[in-house]
Protein backbone atom coordinates (compact mmCIF):
# COMPACT_ATOMS: atom_id res chain seq x y z
CA UNK A 1 0.00 0.00 0.00
CA UNK A 2 2.72 2.41 1.01
CA UNK A 3 4.67 1.54 -2.05
CA UNK A 4 1.78 2.14 -4.40
CA UNK A 5 1.25 5.62 -2.96
CA UNK A 6 4.91 6.48 -3.49
CA UNK A 7 4.93 4.82 -6.87
CA UNK A 8 1.93 6.86 -7.95
CA UNK A 9 3.38 10.10 -6.68
CA UNK A 10 6.84 9.55 -8.14
CA UNK A 11 5.52 8.26 -11.44
CA UNK A 12 3.19 11.24 -11.68
CA UNK A 13 6.11 13.60 -11.16
CA UNK A 14 8.21 11.70 -13.70
CA UNK A 15 5.50 11.86 -16.36
CA UNK A 16 5.13 15.60 -15.81
CA UNK A 17 8.90 15.97 -16.00
CA UNK A 18 9.03 14.09 -19.28
CA UNK A 19 6.55 16.60 -20.64
CA UNK A 20 8.91 19.38 -19.60
CA UNK A 21 7.37 20.53 -16.28
CA UNK A 22 10.30 22.09 -14.42
CA UNK A 23 8.57 22.44 -11.04
CA UNK A 24 7.60 18.76 -11.03
CA UNK A 25 11.10 17.81 -12.10
CA UNK A 26 12.66 19.81 -9.26
CA UNK A 27 10.37 18.11 -6.73
CA UNK A 28 11.15 14.72 -8.20
CA UNK A 29 14.90 15.24 -8.03
CA UNK A 30 14.73 16.48 -4.43
CA UNK A 31 12.72 13.45 -3.33
CA UNK A 32 15.04 11.10 -5.23
CA UNK A 33 18.08 12.73 -3.66
CA UNK A 34 16.73 12.07 -0.17
CA UNK A 35 15.83 8.51 -1.05
CA UNK A 36 19.27 7.89 -2.53
CA UNK A 37 21.18 9.39 0.37
CA UNK A 38 19.42 7.02 2.76
CA UNK A 39 19.79 4.10 0.34
CA UNK A 40 23.55 4.60 -0.09
CA UNK A 41 24.41 5.58 3.47
CA UNK A 42 22.91 2.34 4.67
CA UNK A 43 25.02 0.38 2.21
CA UNK A 44 28.31 2.24 2.42
CA UNK A 45 28.50 2.74 6.16
CA UNK A 46 28.45 6.04 8.02
CA UNK A 47 32.08 7.02 7.38
CA UNK A 48 31.57 7.21 3.61
CA UNK A 49 29.34 10.24 3.41
CA UNK A 50 31.28 11.79 0.61
CA UNK A 51 31.08 8.59 -1.45
CA UNK A 52 27.36 8.50 -0.87
CA UNK A 53 26.98 12.07 -2.04
CA UNK A 54 29.07 11.47 -5.15
CA UNK A 55 26.96 8.43 -5.95
CA UNK A 56 23.77 10.41 -5.46
CA UNK A 57 24.94 13.00 -7.96
CA UNK A 58 25.94 10.31 -10.42
CA UNK A 59 22.55 8.66 -10.21
CA UNK A 60 20.67 11.94 -10.57
CA UNK A 61 22.80 12.73 -13.60
CA UNK A 62 22.06 9.28 -15.05
CA UNK A 63 18.34 9.72 -14.39
CA UNK A 64 18.58 13.03 -16.22
CA UNK A 65 20.65 12.02 -19.22
CA UNK A 66 19.02 8.61 -19.69
CA UNK A 67 15.43 9.49 -18.91
CA UNK A 68 14.52 8.48 -22.46
CA UNK A 69 14.90 4.85 -21.32
CA UNK A 70 12.00 5.14 -18.89
CA UNK A 71 8.94 3.36 -20.29
CA UNK A 72 5.82 5.34 -19.36
CA UNK A 73 3.78 2.15 -19.09
CA UNK A 74 5.98 0.64 -16.38
CA UNK A 75 6.65 1.35 -12.69
CA UNK A 76 8.95 4.28 -12.08
CA UNK A 77 10.49 3.00 -8.86
CA UNK A 78 11.68 -0.22 -10.50
CA UNK A 79 13.41 1.75 -13.25
CA UNK A 80 14.94 4.15 -10.76
CA UNK A 81 16.23 1.52 -8.35
CA UNK A 82 17.83 -0.43 -11.19
CA UNK A 83 19.89 2.67 -11.96
CA UNK A 84 20.71 3.22 -8.28
CA UNK A 85 21.80 -0.41 -7.95
CA UNK A 86 23.84 -0.32 -11.15
CA UNK A 87 25.75 2.71 -9.91
CA UNK A 88 26.32 1.11 -6.51
CA UNK A 89 27.74 -2.06 -8.09
CA UNK A 90 29.88 0.08 -10.37
CA UNK A 91 31.17 1.94 -7.32
CA UNK A 92 32.12 -1.31 -5.56
CA UNK A 93 33.78 -2.62 -8.73
CA UNK A 94 35.96 0.43 -9.23
CA UNK A 95 36.97 0.19 -5.56
CA UNK A 96 37.76 -3.49 -5.96
CA UNK A 97 35.29 -4.60 -3.29
CA UNK A 98 34.16 -8.07 -4.37
CA UNK A 99 32.08 -8.52 -1.25
CA UNK A 100 30.27 -5.27 -1.91
CA UNK A 101 29.42 -6.36 -5.45
CA UNK A 102 28.02 -9.64 -4.19
CA UNK A 103 25.93 -7.98 -1.53
CA UNK A 104 24.61 -5.43 -4.01
CA UNK A 105 23.74 -8.18 -6.51
CA UNK A 106 21.98 -10.11 -3.77
CA UNK A 107 19.87 -7.04 -3.10
CA UNK A 108 17.47 -8.20 -5.77
CA UNK A 109 15.77 -10.68 -3.49
CA UNK A 110 14.93 -8.22 -0.80
CA UNK A 111 14.71 -5.15 -3.03
CA UNK A 112 10.92 -5.00 -3.08
CA UNK A 113 10.65 -4.96 0.69
CA UNK A 114 13.46 -2.52 1.15
CA UNK A 115 11.96 -0.10 -1.29
CA UNK A 116 8.77 -0.29 0.66
CA UNK A 117 10.47 0.21 3.99
CA UNK A 118 12.50 3.06 2.59
CA UNK A 119 9.50 4.89 1.25
CA UNK A 120 7.55 4.32 4.43
CA UNK A 121 10.18 6.14 6.43
CA UNK A 122 11.04 8.91 4.06
CA UNK A 123 8.73 11.06 2.05
CA UNK A 124 5.51 9.53 3.36
CA UNK A 125 6.24 10.28 7.01
CA UNK A 126 7.33 13.77 6.20
CA UNK A 127 4.25 14.41 4.12
CA UNK A 128 1.91 12.97 6.72
CA UNK A 129 3.38 15.18 9.41
CA UNK A 130 1.99 18.19 7.62
CA UNK A 131 -1.60 16.99 8.01
CA UNK A 132 -3.85 17.72 11.02
CA UNK A 133 -3.48 14.96 13.64
CA UNK A 134 -6.89 13.33 13.10
CA UNK A 135 -6.56 13.29 9.34
CA UNK A 136 -3.04 11.96 9.59
CA UNK A 137 -4.15 9.05 11.76
CA UNK A 138 -6.94 8.13 9.34
CA UNK A 139 -4.71 8.31 6.25
CA UNK A 140 -2.10 6.23 8.03
CA UNK A 141 -4.60 3.56 9.07
CA UNK A 142 -6.38 3.22 5.75
CA UNK A 143 -3.77 4.09 3.11
CA UNK A 144 -0.72 2.61 4.82
CA UNK A 145 -1.78 -0.06 7.30
CA UNK A 146 -4.48 -1.24 4.92
CA UNK A 147 -7.49 -1.06 7.24
CA UNK A 148 -10.94 -0.67 5.74
CA UNK A 149 -12.73 2.67 6.07
CA UNK A 150 -15.38 0.86 8.14
CA UNK A 151 -12.80 -0.28 10.70
CA UNK A 152 -11.25 3.16 10.85
CA UNK A 153 -14.70 4.70 11.34
CA UNK A 154 -15.47 2.44 14.29
CA UNK A 155 -12.13 3.13 15.93
CA UNK A 156 -12.34 6.88 15.54
CA UNK A 157 -16.02 7.07 16.41
CA UNK A 158 -16.87 8.96 13.21
CA UNK A 159 -19.27 7.95 10.47
CA UNK A 160 -17.83 6.11 7.50
CA UNK A 161 -18.74 8.95 5.17
CA UNK A 162 -16.86 11.43 7.35
CA UNK A 163 -13.81 9.16 7.36
CA UNK A 164 -13.92 8.96 3.57
CA UNK A 165 -14.10 12.73 3.19
CA UNK A 166 -11.31 13.22 5.68
CA UNK A 167 -9.00 10.78 3.92
CA UNK A 168 -9.84 12.28 0.57
CA UNK A 169 -8.90 15.73 1.84
CA UNK A 170 -5.70 14.41 3.36
CA UNK A 171 -4.65 12.76 0.14
CA UNK A 172 -5.48 15.91 -1.80
CA UNK A 173 -3.33 17.96 0.56
CA UNK A 174 -0.44 15.55 0.06
CA UNK A 175 -0.97 15.70 -3.69
CA UNK A 176 -0.90 19.49 -3.58
CA UNK A 177 2.35 19.43 -1.62
CA UNK A 178 3.87 17.32 -4.36
CA UNK A 179 2.26 19.33 -7.11
CA UNK A 180 0.33 16.45 -8.62
CA UNK A 181 -3.24 17.20 -7.53
CA UNK A 182 -5.65 19.16 -9.67
CA UNK A 183 -7.06 21.99 -7.62
CA UNK A 184 -10.43 22.08 -9.26
CA UNK A 185 -12.29 23.52 -6.27
CA UNK B 1 22.13 26.85 -1.25
CA UNK B 2 24.16 23.69 -0.86
CA UNK B 3 26.20 22.14 -3.63
CA UNK B 4 23.47 19.55 -4.08
CA UNK B 5 20.77 22.14 -4.67
CA UNK B 6 22.89 23.85 -7.30
CA UNK B 7 23.36 20.50 -8.95
CA UNK B 8 19.63 19.87 -9.04
CA UNK B 9 19.01 23.37 -10.38
CA UNK B 10 21.51 22.72 -13.17
CA UNK B 11 19.66 19.54 -14.14
CA UNK B 12 16.28 21.29 -13.99
CA UNK B 13 17.44 24.10 -16.25
CA UNK B 14 18.64 21.50 -18.74
CA UNK B 15 15.24 19.77 -18.88
CA UNK B 16 13.76 19.23 -22.33
CA UNK B 17 10.55 17.29 -23.00
CA UNK B 18 10.82 13.66 -24.07
CA UNK B 19 8.30 12.46 -26.64
CA UNK B 20 6.22 9.37 -26.11
CA UNK B 21 8.04 6.27 -27.37
CA UNK B 22 11.13 8.38 -27.99
CA UNK B 23 13.45 5.42 -27.37
CA UNK B 24 11.52 3.21 -29.80
CA UNK B 25 11.60 5.89 -32.47
CA UNK B 26 15.35 6.08 -32.05
CA UNK B 27 15.57 2.30 -32.28
CA UNK B 28 13.53 2.30 -35.50
CA UNK B 29 15.93 4.81 -37.00
CA UNK B 30 18.86 2.67 -35.85
CA UNK B 31 17.45 -0.41 -37.59
CA UNK B 32 16.70 1.47 -40.82
CA UNK B 33 20.31 2.66 -40.92
CA UNK B 34 21.50 -0.92 -40.38
CA UNK B 35 19.31 -2.34 -43.16
CA UNK B 36 20.42 0.35 -45.61
CA UNK B 37 24.05 -0.36 -44.71
CA UNK B 38 23.57 -4.10 -45.26
CA UNK B 39 21.78 -3.48 -48.58
CA UNK B 40 24.68 -1.33 -49.72
CA UNK B 41 27.07 -4.14 -48.78
CA UNK B 42 24.93 -6.58 -50.75
CA UNK B 43 25.00 -4.38 -53.87
CA UNK B 44 28.77 -4.07 -53.66
CA UNK B 45 29.22 -7.83 -53.17
CA UNK B 46 26.99 -8.62 -56.18
CA UNK B 47 29.42 -6.89 -58.49
CA UNK B 48 32.12 -9.31 -57.34
CA UNK B 49 30.41 -12.56 -58.08
CA UNK B 50 28.79 -14.47 -60.95
CA UNK B 51 25.11 -13.84 -61.43
CA UNK B 52 22.27 -15.52 -59.62
CA UNK B 53 22.01 -19.27 -59.66
CA UNK B 54 18.63 -20.85 -59.54
CA UNK B 55 17.20 -20.72 -56.00
CA UNK B 56 14.09 -22.73 -55.14
CA UNK B 57 11.10 -20.81 -53.84
CA UNK B 58 11.05 -22.87 -50.64
CA UNK B 59 14.69 -22.23 -49.83
CA UNK B 60 14.27 -18.51 -50.48
CA UNK B 61 11.32 -18.21 -48.12
CA UNK B 62 12.84 -20.34 -45.36
CA UNK B 63 15.93 -18.12 -45.38
CA UNK B 64 13.93 -14.94 -45.67
CA UNK B 65 11.47 -15.78 -42.88
CA UNK B 66 13.99 -17.41 -40.54
CA UNK B 67 16.27 -14.39 -40.63
CA UNK B 68 13.29 -12.00 -40.45
CA UNK B 69 12.09 -13.70 -37.26
CA UNK B 70 15.58 -13.67 -35.71
CA UNK B 71 15.97 -10.04 -36.65
CA UNK B 72 12.58 -9.05 -35.21
CA UNK B 73 13.09 -10.94 -31.95
CA UNK B 74 16.52 -9.39 -31.44
CA UNK B 75 15.13 -5.91 -32.19
CA UNK B 76 12.58 -6.38 -29.40
CA UNK B 77 15.38 -7.71 -27.18
CA UNK B 78 17.46 -4.63 -27.99
CA UNK B 79 14.62 -2.40 -26.80
CA UNK B 80 14.57 -4.40 -23.54
CA UNK B 81 18.31 -4.45 -22.78
CA UNK B 82 18.56 -0.75 -23.52
CA UNK B 83 16.55 -0.11 -20.35
CA UNK B 84 17.84 -0.64 -16.79
CA UNK B 85 17.24 -4.19 -15.60
CA UNK B 86 15.90 -5.31 -18.98
CA UNK B 87 15.37 -9.09 -19.30
CA UNK B 88 14.99 -10.96 -22.58
CA UNK B 89 13.76 -14.42 -21.56
CA UNK B 90 10.67 -14.38 -23.78
CA UNK B 91 12.71 -13.34 -26.80
CA UNK B 92 15.21 -16.13 -26.20
CA UNK B 93 12.25 -18.50 -26.28
CA UNK B 94 11.16 -17.10 -29.67
CA UNK B 95 14.68 -17.60 -31.02
CA UNK B 96 14.85 -21.18 -29.78
CA UNK B 97 11.45 -22.02 -31.30
CA UNK B 98 12.42 -20.46 -34.66
CA UNK B 99 15.69 -22.41 -34.70
CA UNK B 100 13.90 -25.66 -33.79
CA UNK B 101 11.42 -25.24 -36.64
CA UNK B 102 14.22 -24.70 -39.16
CA UNK B 103 16.05 -27.76 -37.80
CA UNK B 104 12.90 -29.84 -38.24
CA UNK B 105 12.51 -28.59 -41.81
CA UNK B 106 16.16 -29.40 -42.44
CA UNK B 107 15.74 -32.96 -41.16
CA UNK B 108 12.62 -33.35 -43.32
CA UNK B 109 14.50 -32.16 -46.41
CA UNK B 110 17.37 -34.55 -45.72
CA UNK B 111 15.05 -37.56 -45.30
CA UNK B 112 13.32 -36.75 -48.59
CA UNK B 113 16.58 -36.31 -50.52
CA UNK B 114 19.10 -38.88 -51.86
CA UNK B 115 22.27 -39.21 -49.80
CA UNK B 116 24.32 -38.08 -52.79
CA UNK B 117 22.78 -34.60 -52.50
CA UNK B 118 23.78 -34.17 -48.83
CA UNK B 119 27.03 -32.25 -49.43
CA UNK B 120 25.10 -29.75 -51.58
CA UNK B 121 22.40 -29.33 -48.98
CA UNK B 122 24.72 -29.04 -46.00
CA UNK B 123 27.92 -27.44 -47.30
CA UNK B 124 26.74 -25.99 -50.62
CA UNK B 125 28.97 -23.56 -52.48
CA UNK B 126 29.36 -21.01 -49.80
CA UNK B 127 29.65 -22.57 -46.32
CA UNK B 128 33.26 -21.38 -46.00
CA UNK B 129 32.33 -17.72 -46.30
CA UNK B 130 28.58 -17.39 -45.68
CA UNK B 131 28.81 -16.83 -41.87
CA UNK B 132 31.56 -14.25 -42.33
CA UNK B 133 29.62 -12.39 -45.00
CA UNK B 134 26.61 -12.26 -42.68
CA UNK B 135 28.80 -10.74 -39.97
CA UNK B 136 30.28 -8.31 -42.52
CA UNK B 137 26.87 -7.27 -43.85
CA UNK B 138 25.86 -6.60 -40.26
CA UNK B 139 28.76 -4.24 -39.48
CA UNK B 140 26.84 -1.02 -40.28
CA UNK B 141 23.92 -2.33 -38.20
CA UNK B 142 26.29 -3.18 -35.36
CA UNK B 143 27.73 0.33 -35.32
CA UNK B 144 24.22 1.78 -35.33
CA UNK B 145 23.13 -0.56 -32.51
CA UNK B 146 26.11 0.40 -30.37
CA UNK B 147 25.40 4.07 -30.99
CA UNK B 148 21.85 3.39 -29.81
CA UNK B 149 22.91 1.48 -26.68
CA UNK B 150 25.57 3.96 -25.63
CA UNK B 151 22.85 6.59 -25.35
CA UNK B 152 20.55 4.24 -23.46
CA UNK B 153 20.95 2.59 -20.03
CA UNK B 154 21.93 -1.10 -20.35
CA UNK B 155 22.75 -2.51 -16.92
CA UNK B 156 24.32 -5.71 -18.28
CA UNK B 157 26.97 -4.61 -20.79
CA UNK B 158 27.99 -8.06 -22.06
CA UNK B 159 24.39 -9.17 -22.59
CA UNK B 160 23.48 -5.87 -24.25
CA UNK B 161 26.52 -6.20 -26.52
CA UNK B 162 25.52 -9.74 -27.42
CA UNK B 163 22.01 -8.61 -28.34
CA UNK B 164 23.40 -5.70 -30.38
CA UNK B 165 25.68 -8.12 -32.25
CA UNK B 166 23.04 -10.81 -32.76
CA UNK B 167 20.59 -8.17 -33.99
CA UNK B 168 23.22 -6.85 -36.43
CA UNK B 169 23.76 -10.46 -37.56
CA UNK B 170 19.99 -10.81 -37.98
CA UNK B 171 19.88 -7.69 -40.16
CA UNK B 172 22.94 -8.85 -42.12
CA UNK B 173 21.52 -12.36 -42.55
CA UNK B 174 18.13 -11.09 -43.65
CA UNK B 175 19.62 -8.86 -46.35
CA UNK B 176 22.10 -11.59 -47.31
CA UNK B 177 19.17 -13.99 -47.84
CA UNK B 178 17.80 -11.81 -50.64
CA UNK B 179 20.53 -13.02 -53.00
CA UNK B 180 21.92 -16.18 -51.40
CA UNK B 181 22.30 -19.06 -53.87
CA UNK B 182 21.91 -22.01 -51.52
CA UNK B 183 18.99 -24.45 -51.68
CA UNK B 184 19.67 -26.56 -48.59
CA UNK B 185 17.63 -25.97 -45.45
CA UNK B 186 20.34 -27.72 -43.38
CA UNK B 187 22.70 -25.12 -44.82
CA UNK B 188 20.48 -22.36 -43.48
CA UNK B 189 20.07 -23.99 -40.07
CA UNK B 190 23.83 -24.34 -39.65
CA UNK B 191 25.61 -21.49 -41.40
CA UNK B 192 23.10 -18.68 -41.05
CA UNK B 193 22.70 -19.46 -37.35
CA UNK B 194 26.49 -19.60 -36.90
CA UNK B 195 26.93 -16.25 -38.62
CA UNK B 196 24.39 -14.59 -36.35
CA UNK B 197 25.83 -16.25 -33.22
CA UNK B 198 29.34 -15.19 -34.22
CA UNK B 199 28.13 -11.64 -34.62
CA UNK B 200 26.56 -11.86 -31.14
CA UNK B 201 29.77 -13.16 -29.54
CA UNK B 202 31.81 -10.36 -31.09
CA UNK B 203 29.18 -7.90 -29.90
CA UNK B 204 29.35 -9.29 -26.39
CA UNK B 205 33.13 -8.80 -26.26
CA UNK B 206 32.86 -5.25 -27.57
CA UNK B 207 29.91 -4.44 -25.30
CA UNK B 208 31.65 -5.66 -22.17
CA UNK B 209 34.26 -2.95 -22.53
CA UNK B 210 32.35 -0.13 -24.12
CA UNK B 211 28.81 -0.14 -22.74
CA UNK B 212 29.56 1.06 -19.21
CA UNK B 213 28.11 4.36 -18.11
Image: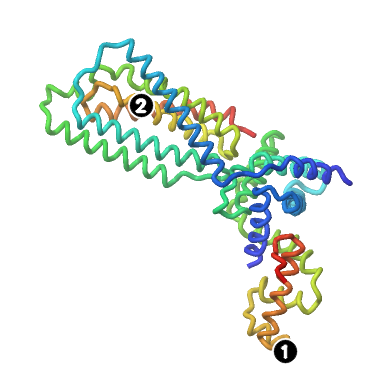
Which residue is label 2 attached to?
B175
Q: Position of residue A62 (x, y in %)?
A: 68, 40
Count of numbered badges drawn on the protein: 2
Query: What residue is rendered at 64% in x and 61% in y?
Result: A8
- The residue sitting at the front extreme is A185
Is residue B90 depicted above or below A90 in this figure? below
- The answer for which chain carries disc 1 is A
> Residue at coordinates 71% horizontally, 50% vertically from top-left?
A21
Residue B197 visible, this angle = no
Q: Are marks 1 and 2 in contact (CB under 8 Å)?
A: no
* Rendered position, A119 above or below B62: below
For the residue labelled by badge 2, is the local secondary structure a helix, a strand or a loop? Answer: helix
Q: Secondary structure at mark 1?
A: loop
Residue at image coords 27%, 40%? B101
The quadrant of the image that shows the C terminus of chain B is top right
Please name the residue that numbered disc 1 is placed on: A157
Tell me which colouring the rendered structure shows.
Answer: rainbow
Chain letter for mark 2, please.
B
In the rendered structure, the answer to whether residue B161 lies left or right of residue B112 reads right
Q: Eyeballing the image, is A182 above or below B143?
A: below
Using the image as rendered, state which of residue A27 and residue A3 is in the foreground: A27
Q: Nearer the viewer, mark 1 or mark 2?
A: 2
Asked if marks 1 and 2 fall on the same chain, the answer is no
Q: Nearer the viewer, residue B133 or A65?
A: A65
Residue A177 is situated, as x and y percent measured from the top left of the image, at 77, 63
The answer to whether residue A107 is seen in the rendering is yes
When the figure is inspected, residue B116 is found, relative to residue A64, above or below; the finding is above
Q: Quadrant of residue B138?
A: top left
Q: CA distance from mark 1 to mark 2?
A: 74 Å
Q: Nearer the viewer, residue A176 or B4?
A: A176
Q: Is residue B178 left or right of residue A184?
A: left
Amino acid sequence: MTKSVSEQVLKGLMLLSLDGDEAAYRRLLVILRDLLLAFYRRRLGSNADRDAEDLVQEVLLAVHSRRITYDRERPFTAWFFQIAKYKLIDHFRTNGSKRGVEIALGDEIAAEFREEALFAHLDIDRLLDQLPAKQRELVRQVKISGKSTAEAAIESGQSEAMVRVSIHRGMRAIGRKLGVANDEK
Amino acid sequence: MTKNDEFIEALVSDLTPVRRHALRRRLALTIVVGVIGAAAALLISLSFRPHLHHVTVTAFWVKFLYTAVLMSATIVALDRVARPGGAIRSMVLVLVVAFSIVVLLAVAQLTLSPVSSYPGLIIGYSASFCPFLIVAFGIPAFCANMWFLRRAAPTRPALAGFVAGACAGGVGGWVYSWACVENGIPFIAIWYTLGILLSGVVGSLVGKGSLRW
